[in-house]
Amino acid sequence: MERTNKYGSVPDLPDEELADPEELERQMYMEEWGAILMLPVRGAPKFRPEVDEDGFVKGAFGTVDFERISPKFDKLRYKVDKLREERRDVSIMIDTVRYRVRDSDRYGLVKDALKHKTDIDDIPDDDVRALVGLYRRRQRLTEEIERLQKARQRRQQRELAAMLARWE
């Protein structure tokens, strides 16, 4: 009994010339999701190593040399990057809320509130209160980013000093 192709065939065309099922699936995904897949992604990996069915990385990226020279995951840098993204989002919200507040109200109240001369709960206008809250949040994020960057620099200096001590 002759076994037929489970995907069907085309008359007068050998089965070797038919598209692979994986290629047909890729074409379908590109047709349905192509526009979204073409959007740039911030922080996307520079390469995607090929992984076999057992979960092992194929090729040069799975070698001991690559693991040895590839940088270790830096938690502080990752956290700083995430806080910067959050600060950017807060800045966008500030720009959005800022247009709802009259200039005469905004500058004096925001200035006093940021210097903690005015309590945020004492501000009568909801939009100004939201604006002050967003400014304070951005200020806290900036301070946290600076603190983490200093800690990262101190850690790098300690690691460098330890590496130099090993060479001596």
Image (tube, grey):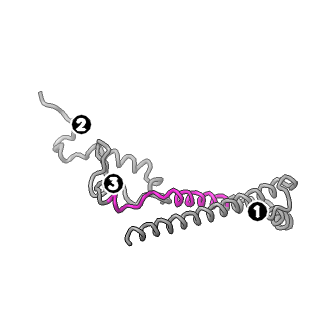
Specify whether 115 is left or right of 64.
right
Quote the CA–CA distance across marks 3 and 1. 47 Å
Horizontal and vertical percent position of residue 166: 39, 67
Residue on which the image places disc 3: 49
Quadrant in the picture for residue 137: bottom right
According to the picture, the residue beneath numbered tag 2 turns out to be 8
Does the residue at mark 1 contact the one at mark 2 (Cβ under 8 Å)?
Answer: no
3 vs 2, front mark: 3
Q: Residue at x 34, y 60 (%)?
A: 68
Q: What residue do we see at 50% from left, 66% from top?
A: 158
Which marked residue is nearer to the observer: mark 3 or mark 1?
A: 3
Dot placed on the residue nearer the N-terminal end, 1 or 2: 2
Where is residue 74 shown, x and y percent of the image?
48, 58
User: Residue 99 — which label?
Assistant: 1
Residue 145 on image: x %, y %: 62, 62
- What is the magenta range? 66-90
Q: Do the CB atoms of the residues marked 3 and 2 lie less than 8 Å apart?
A: no
The disc, 3 or 2, on the residue closer to the chain's N-terminal end is 2
Q: Is residue 102 visible?
A: no
| Amino acid carrying mark 3 in the image | Pro
Residue 93 horizontal side relative to residue 72, left or right: right
Reading the chain from its start, which is encountered first: label 3 or label 1? 3
Q: Position of residue 114 (x, y in %)?
A: 79, 63
Question: 61 and 105: which one is in front?
Answer: 61
How packed mark 1 is, by other alpha carbons closer than 10 Å (few <14, some 14-19, many 20 or more), is few
Q: Residues within 10 Å of mark 2 (few under 14, many from 20)?
A: few
Kindly indicate the quadrant of the structure image that contains residue 99. bottom right
The reply to whether discs 3 and 1 touch (Cβ–Cβ < 8 Å) is no
Q: Verify whether residue 74 appears in magenta.
A: yes
